[in-house]
Image: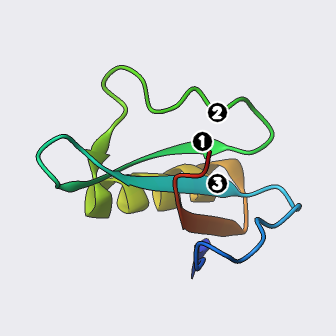
Amino acid sequence: MAKVIYLHPSEPIPIERHIAVVVHRDHMGAEKGYFYDTAESDHGGSGPFDWRLSEAIQRAEQFATQQQIDAVVVRTKRS
């Protein structure tokens, strides 16, 4: 099982490969999230890949386990 790490917005993003869960608020103010493998490109959660935050974290953990990636890093969206 992958380790879930919550980053403060001012903390640096790890350079090691991980699954990144990017947290943001939708137009109604609800916390949403999407994830991506840092060995791939971040497509910004476009399309159907923008879930409730808890679901995004759960899916990211499952994906990390399937891909044998040790960490899921949850962080706020950065410019």
- Above or below residue 9? Residue 50 is above
**Of callouts 2 and 3, the N-terminal one:** 3
Q: Is residue 24 left or right of residue 22?
A: left
Residue at (76% x, 65% y) in the render: 13
Q: Amino acid at mark 2?
A: Asp
Question: Which is in the foreground here, disc 2 or disc 3?
Answer: 2
Q: Residues within 10 Å of mark 1 (few under 14, many from 20)?
A: many
Which quadrant would residue 55 be assigned to in this image? bottom left
Q: Dot 2, crowdedness within 10 Å: few (<14), some or many (≥20)? A: some
Q: How many marks?
A: 3
- Number of the front mark, 1 or 2: 2
| Contact check, label 2 and label 3, Cβ < 8 Å | no
- Which of 14 and 71 lies nearest the eye of the viewer? 14
Q: Amino acid at mark 3?
A: Ile
Q: Which residue is mark 2?
A: 42
- The image shows residue 33, relative to residue 27, as above or below, that is below
Q: Position of residue 48 (x, y in %)?
A: 30, 25
The residue under the point 87% across, 62% down is 16
The residue under label 3 is: 19
Q: Residue furthest right?
A: 15
Dot 3: within a 10 Å radius of its alpha carbon, few (fewer than 14), some, or many (20 or more) residues? Answer: many
Q: Which residue is mark 1?
A: 36
User: Label for residue 23?
Assistant: none
The answer to whether the residue labelled 1 contacts the one labelled 2, judged by CB atoms less than 8 Å apart, is: yes
Q: Amino acid at mark 1?
A: Tyr
Question: Residue 50: x percent and y percent?
Answer: 33, 38
| Local SS, label 2 | loop
Q: Position of residue 35 (x, y in %)?
A: 51, 46
Residue in front for this viewpoint, 16 or 22: 22
Per the model, the C-alpha gap separating discs 3 and 1 is 6 Å
Task: Give the residue at x 68% y 69%.
Answer: 71
